[in-house]
Image (tube, grey):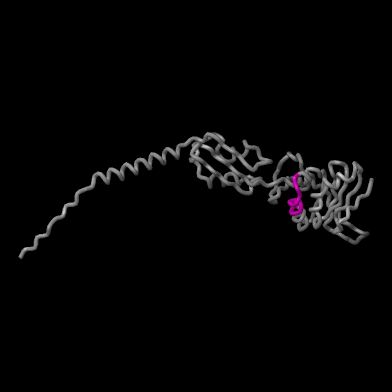
Amino acid sequence: MNNKKKKIRRKLKWKSLLKIGLIVLVGYLGYLGIRLIPTNHIVVLGNNYLTDEEVIEMSLYQNYPCLFCLANHKIKDSLKQSPYINDVKIKKNLLGELTISIDEARPLFYNRDKKRLILSNFKEVDTNNLEGVPILTNYVPDQLYEKLINGFNKLSSDVIALISEIIYEPWKNGDIIIDDSRFFLQMNDGNHVYVNTIHIDKLNNYIDIYATLEDKKGTLYLDSSSDKISFSLF
């Protein structure tokens, strides 16, 4: 017997192929549509020291390219080149709005020895803008210098703005050093303050303490563990 193989012809389902093609086409057109959404509005959040214009320029969106032309990670990488920026969050919506939320480092003081502005993230900036920051006028040993920065990180920006100069001045009795972590601060209001890195957070109470002085001028001692306020008139 001759076994004849039957040839099975499968009919192409043109309707199914057409549907798939339409879905692909619509998806592609949708992708192009989203891809080419113009940037209509840019919102910058979290910046106190950098201007909106500076942030927008560093984000590479100063010329308002299409919203999705640049990947979020590229925007972040560009922004994080700034020493002022610790971290960045990027949001985009279909209305053409780009939101840039930044975690910004604070200026703490200007180091006259290094000729650099010191930020809360330990980075240093070459700038002439010293508004609102005190000046460290002399050299501080490296180990103590790190503690000084950590200490200033605990202070509010309002308190930092009240300080004019920071002078490293260990407490000595003759040739014996009693406290090698002490600093002398000249305040913008004319008062003097002694503080050390251990108790530097006491400076956050300075505004309240000043209110009790009744405009008297003198030296305030905040370098001890005592809760009592020691103040001597000039």
| Magenta segment includes 9 | no
Q: Residue at x 85, y 50 (%)?
A: 184
Left or right relative to 215: residue 62: left
Left or right relative to 167: residue 69: left
Across and down, in percent, residue 74 comes to 53, 45
Q: Residue at x 40, y 40 (%)?
A: 30
Left or right relative to 207: residue 59: left
Q: Compared with residue 77, is residue 146 higher up or lower down, i.e. above or below? A: below
Residue sticking out furthest to the left: 1
Across and down, in percent, residue 153 comes to 73, 51
Across and down, in percent, residue 171 comes to 88, 57
Considering the whole magenta stretch, tell me its main secondary structure: helix
Across and down, in percent, residue 84 comes to 66, 45
Residue sticking out furthest to the bottom: 1
Q: Which residues are magenta?
A: 149-157
For residue 176, what is the image quadrant? bottom right
